[in-house]
Image (cartoon, rainbow, N blue to C red):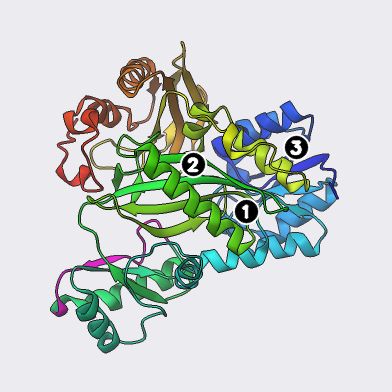
Amino acid sequence: MPREIRKILVANRGEIACRIIWTCKEMGIKTVAVHSEADRESLHVKFADEAVCIGPAPSSQSYLNIPSIISAAEITDADAIHPGYGFLAESATFAKICEDCNIKFIGPRPDVIAMMGDKVEARRTMTAAGVPILPGSPDPIESSEEAKALALDIGFPVIIKAAAGGGGRGMRIVRSADELASNLELAQTEALAAFKNGAVYIERYIERPRHIEIQVLADEHNNVIHLGERECTIQRRHQKLLEEAPSPAISSRLREEMGAVAVKACREIGYSSAGTFEFLLDEDDQFYFMEMNTRIQVEHPVTEMVTLADIVRNQIVIATGKDVGYTQDEVQISGHSIECRINAEDPVKFTPSPGKITAFNFPGGPGVRVDTAAYPGYVVPPYYDSMIAKLIVHARTRELAIARMQRALEMMVIEGIKTTIPLHQRIMADENFRSGNFSTKFMEEFKYEV
């Protein structure tokens, strides 16, 4: 039975909060912005129909403050909460509290979030669903002796990963038995500090993989489609720098195979909402499940550009209980899209560069999109993620998309703070990038002094 959503509280900030508000306006849905004291002048606060301050600047006291967010939803009569990405987007606890308070959480069920958020449980679940995974530990590692026995069995190098996390935290590459015990302890300590959960697991490490992800949409009636793949291989310390769709390394046959695996897995776990399956692709075109993100991704715009989908709209429609809206045969991939994450950082040292933006010129022209909450006079706060904009281009071919991105980067002027624009300009000019011949080692081998 379809449920009506008349007002959505956006439990996030910055560009993703603005992005959600854009679609809500097109759908005739009212919006509520929540904000910290540091974000009173943010664009998402100005664009929403209502705004509620939920606490001081630190995210632990504001954007992660569940009682304040629920109270804001209740006092504004919001029917639903959209969590965006980050913060509470993959919190099964938050999703369950929303459910208990009769507020629709725009995302999958709490039990599915919990299942896929625990990386060890996710590996078990994907194995049962027939998804290829790398050889590794079926349960969290309890001791260095257990770790050594497993590593010797699957072969070095191995990688230690946090069971509850991602983004490179609680992660260690180990190339010999002598290095195992110390790295295991470090990974457990990092995981505990970052995720309040010190559990880690081990799997085989692929030296030069590509990072490929499949975007899925699934509704409550077990209708599932995929929107093709994204290439997310260009990373620094496991943090993505830029993304593109489609991948220059993926054939139509491999796209169909990976997409079919992701769709089958969604049906097996009863998934509904937008989601992303992340895979490692080796040099022999063998792919292995890495994790599932049960939310919208930072890089969703490149998929939107090549498919004409509005993934936020899809999430909201699915949350009302309606069908996903179209079939796999209706999904068409057209042209090529690239997204550069523009961060308020020193482009060489990667140190944060908060402060006042004194000038901001948006590039325009055919096939150019800028997702941002920044503007001239905006003060970038030091409390949150450093990404201030996403520059996205679309063109008929990858070669033309690179040329368009080069032009757009040149015309994107941000003054008053340092940004990663010069770094992206160097990447666009790099021959390995232009040829599509790269792996996750790209930034280690790239000469990126600017």
Q: Which residue is nearer to you in this view: 105 or 324? A: 324
Identify the mark nearer the N-term, 3 or 2: 3
Q: Hey, what amino acid is under mark 2? A: Val
Q: CA distance from mark 1 to mark 2?
A: 21 Å
Residue 40 visible in rendering: no
Residue 418, by quadrant, is top left
Q: Which residue is nearer to you in this view: 195 or 215? A: 215
Is 236 rendered above or below residue 375?
Answer: below
Magenta stretch: includes residue 172? yes
User: Which residues are drawn in magenta?
Assistant: 166-177
Q: CA distance from mark 3 to mark 2?
A: 21 Å
Residue for badge 1: 62
Is 7 rendered above or below residue 135?
Answer: above
Q: CA distance from mark 3 to mark 1?
A: 18 Å
Residue for badge 3: 31
- Residue at x 75%, y 42% (from the top left corner): 8
- Mark closer to the observer (3, 2): 2
Residue 389 visible in rendering: yes
